Amino acid sequence: MTEQMPGKIIPILPCRSLNEQLDFYQSLGFEMTYTQARPNQYACVRHLIAELHFFVLKELDPAKNYSMCYVHVADVDAVYETLCESLKRNTNRIPVRGYPKITKPNSLAEDRRFNLVDPSGNRILIGTKHAAPQSKAEPEVTVHASKFRNAFETAYKLAYAKDDPAHAAKVLDLVLPRMEEAPLPLRYRAVILRADIAHLLDENEAALSFMDKVSQISLSSISLCAEEHLLVQEAAKRLEELRAALLADRRLERPE
């Protein structure tokens, strides 16, 4: 019987500047384990969740960098909280746009994950696989409702998995004018998603407008199954986080 040989994959990613890269990862709680200046600039960082290596590519454009890797963890929410706490402690901020940034955890069909994008545009996808496949909660009653659901799921994935909020906005805006044809819980989640997308695009007035529309959707008259209730709860939590983020943005716009 052939003995199993365990392996370990270590991503080697490009960066514009070692100093910029190392500052960011150390602010997240990574430990620098190695650095060299010659014959080429190279550095290594390590965390409980992963080991990453970097080489310098001075002409790198973060917006055109397609390097990425997926890191599977046992508890994605705990990892997110740990990284954010370290960022707050070391930089006093959580970047949500541009380079670098860290997105909030979101539940997709295959896993629950968040994206970590570093100053050079490398994308580290950190997630926890679902124990069982995620099923659809609301029944697809009509063709229009089915189209609305498909658009919602596409926009959700574009915004949170693909980190492409501009494309997500276009997809969702095509169906929102006809959202009365979709089930109430799905409408509620879709408008909150659109508000969050507007905030990701730094369109805060639009985000506030969509948040006003959320208040016009009442779920008190319908009964929700257990899965629907969880999905609505998750959306409501995102709405509260969005309110807090918009409030923080306003405070930054009006310094004392």
Image (tube, grey):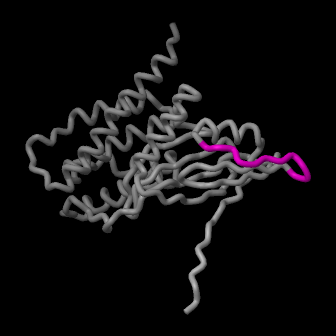
Q: Position of residue 65 (x, y in %)?
A: 69, 52
**Residue 36 magenta-drawn?**
yes
Q: Residue at x 41, y 46 (%)?
A: 78
Is 48 positioned to the left or the right of 247 in the image? right
Is 121 positioned to the left or the right of 179 in the image? right
Closest to the observer, 159 or 180: 159
Q: Position of residue 185 (x, y in %)?
A: 21, 49
Q: Residue at x 49, y 43 (%)?
A: 103
Q: Which residues are magenta?
A: 30-40
Which image quarter: residue 193? top left
Q: Residue furthest top?
A: 256
Closest to the observer, 163 or 129: 129
**Residue 86 magenta-drawn?**
no
In the rendered image, the vertical position of residue 121 relative to residue 252, given as above or below:
below
Of the 4 image quadrants, the one containing the N terminus is bottom right
Q: Position of residue 240 (x, y in %)?
A: 32, 32
Q: Residue at x 19, y 49 (%)?
A: 229
Which image quarter: residue 236? top left
Q: How many numbered marks have been drawn onto this rendered protein structure? A: 0
Q: Residue furthest right?
A: 39
Closest to the observer, 39 or 14: 39
